[in-house]
Amino acid sequence: MGGLGSGRHWHWNTKNTVTDYRALDVRRWARDGLLNPCNRFGWQWTVDGEKTGSIQVAVERNSVRLIYRCKENGSDWEDIEYPVWLTSTACNYGGERQWFLCPAYGCGRRVAKLYGGRIFACRHCHQLAYPSQREKSYDRAARKADKIRTRLGWDLGLEGLPRGRPKGMHRNTYERLSRQVWELTDEAEEGFAAHFAFALLKLDPSLQP
């Protein structure tokens, strides 16, 4: 017999990014002191303050047991329970960092987060990407420019006005960051212009030069 998740399509719905799935974060559980053996706790997800899902977690030695109910594709509710093994690595400045070992059949990757699904598995098993991986190049350039603008205390957006050098920032650093903002802004504006022109051409092929 195969392992957990073998022999069937075990995704709820294949989505594009990690933000489409409920996540379990072992770092959060460790930080909150929840991973003591024999501990049992409930975990839930909310959207705009309303509960959208929940799970029970029983902590065992070197593992956690996930206990929940699942309903997919109009089928009846199914009680699901299985262990997820834990491992740890030493931190550079002392202490340990906890990790999940992905429970999906044939995987076992060491990961900080698992995503549900009928079963909770790593983003590779669910074929998920991070939102930034779905960005167009000009969107990415605009986002990076705004990140630098925030650091400089400037107005955000492609037409955001500069506000001068922040107090305490070295002049060379300011000049380097300013140059990066304008380079990224130019890249974003060129990309948006090309995208807009392509969209117009699809609507009206007569605009072809």
Image (cartoon, rainbow, N blue to C red):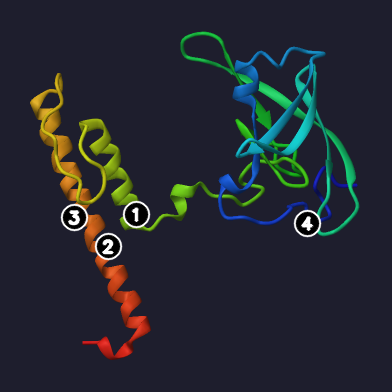
Task: Tell me which residue sits at (75%, 19%) in the image.
Answer: 62
Measure the C-alpha gap from mark 1 to mark 3.
12 Å
The residue identified by callout 2 is: 191
Q: Could you tell me residue 169's position as x and y percent?
A: 15, 23
The residue identified by callout 4 is: 9
Measure the C-alpha gap from mark 4 to mark 3.
45 Å
What kind of residue is marked 3? Asp
The residue identified by callout 1 is: 139
Measure the C-alpha gap from mark 2 to mark 1.
8 Å
Task: Tell me which residue sits at (25%, 31%) in the image.
Answer: 151
Point out the tag, 1 or 3, that comes first from the N-terminus.
Answer: 1
Give residue 10's mark: none
What kind of residue is marked 4? His
Q: Secondary structure at mark 3?
A: helix
CB of mark 2 within 8 Å of CB of mark 4?
Answer: no
Number of other residues with Cα within 10 Å of mark 3, as a class: few under 14, some 14 to 19, many 20 or more? some
Point out the tag, 1 or 4, that comes first from the N-terminus.
Answer: 4
Kindly report which numbered mark, 1 or 4, lies closer to the viewer in this rendering: 1
The residue identified by callout 3 is: 186
Q: Residue furthest front?
A: 49
What kind of residue is marked 2? Gly
Give the image quarter of residue 73.
bottom right
Number of other residues with Cα within 10 Å of mark 4, as a class: few under 14, some 14 to 19, many 20 or more? few
